[in-house]
Image (cartoon, rainbow, N blue to C red):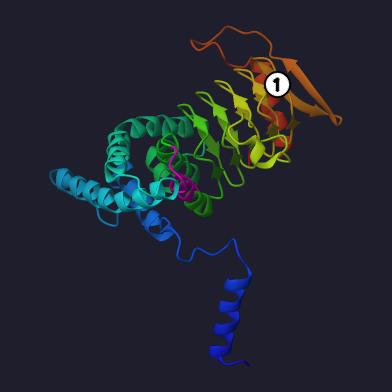
Amino acid sequence: MDSLSQITESILASYHDVGGINNIDGSNLPSKRAIATVCEDLLQLLFPGFHDQEPIHSQHLRRVTAYRVQSVADRLRDELRKSLQLAEPTCPKAKAERILCKFLHELPAVREMLQTDVAAAFSGDPSAASFDEIIVAYPFLEAVAIQRLAHIFYGENLPLLPRIMTEWAHGRTGTDIHPGAKIGSHFFIDHCTGTVIGETCEIGDHVKMYQGVSLIARSLAGGQGLKGMKRHPTIEDHVTIYAGTTIMGGDTVIGAGSTIGANVFLTHSVPPRSLVFYEENQLKIVPKKPREESPNGTHLSAANEKLALEIAAARGAGI
């Protein structure tokens, strides 16, 4: 075996010869480890008492919350400055402070959205025993919580940091949601493993998806030339998408109230209140039968609801 000094020299030679993956004498990049700990503490702020080893008594809640806000602010401020200086080396500290204050002020609004996500999971999953179980044990909620937070930073055109946040959640949950995606209220991903939601996706309210759903771009052959363009689909309100389905393209719109069966490969829009499934290897798109509308006007007829569930079960969506 070569000596450690020889191995060191070999690695140093690689640093010299193999460019593009070194950051030596360059910018001080945001710390993935620091951002990971901030994400964990943000989850404690969003769901007090659910991510702690000890219970929090109401008489101590103000003190504990104040300490956590201060701790998160101090660490996040440093990572914000590093991120901003990647695009603007002389970026004033005041800009980082402005973004930080805006972010922290948004936490109550994010909590309100997450409460709707928990409610959607409870109403949409008969195996859910309680809200507590969903908050503690359902990985989709962690992925969506971090994405909703990262989306605030994404809106400020902040380099790296929001993507590091969502990739941290991706690694923990198996759910890949880009910080740029726009997601409405009452969002639920059942099981959630293997789900991919691209940067320019727009998802309405009361959308339910199952594991392995991919909302992706039609082609990335254009590379950086596609940057800033609408590349990923739009999912309107009250849509259900079963397991293993792929929906592609920035001009693809799934109309409100539609149900997309399992393992469908879809590259074009469908009208509102459509039922999309495979029958004898042929893609079928049929309108849902009318019924007496609920207040939101989007519920399936009893027959079509039964058909959708049968399709889902046959394709392994409702495990």
| Label 1: which secondary element | loop
Q: What residue is drawn where x is 52% and y is 54%?
A: 171
Q: Position of residue 215 (x, y in %)?
A: 64, 35
Q: Which residues are magenta?
A: 157-166
Against 15, residue 121 (above or below) is above
The verdict on residue 161 being magenta is yes
Residue under numbered circle 1: 269
In what quadrant of the picture does the C terminus appear?
A: top right
Q: What residue is drawn where x is 31% and y is 48%?
A: 44
Against 271, residue 242 (above or below) is below
Q: Quadrant of residue 131?
A: top left
The verdict on residue 139 being magenta is no
Please state which amino acid type lies under the numbered disc 1: Ser
Q: Quadrant of residue 151?
A: top left
Q: Position of residue 169 (x, y in %)?
A: 48, 49
Say left or right for 30 vs 181.
left
* Pick the front one: 3 or 249: 3
* Pick the front one: 178 or 292: 178
Q: What residue is drawn where x is 44% and y is 32%?
A: 117
Question: Could you tell me if residue 125 is visible in this image?
Answer: no
Q: Which residue, as the protein is rendered here, is positioned at the far left?
A: 59
Say left or right for 153 vs 253.
left
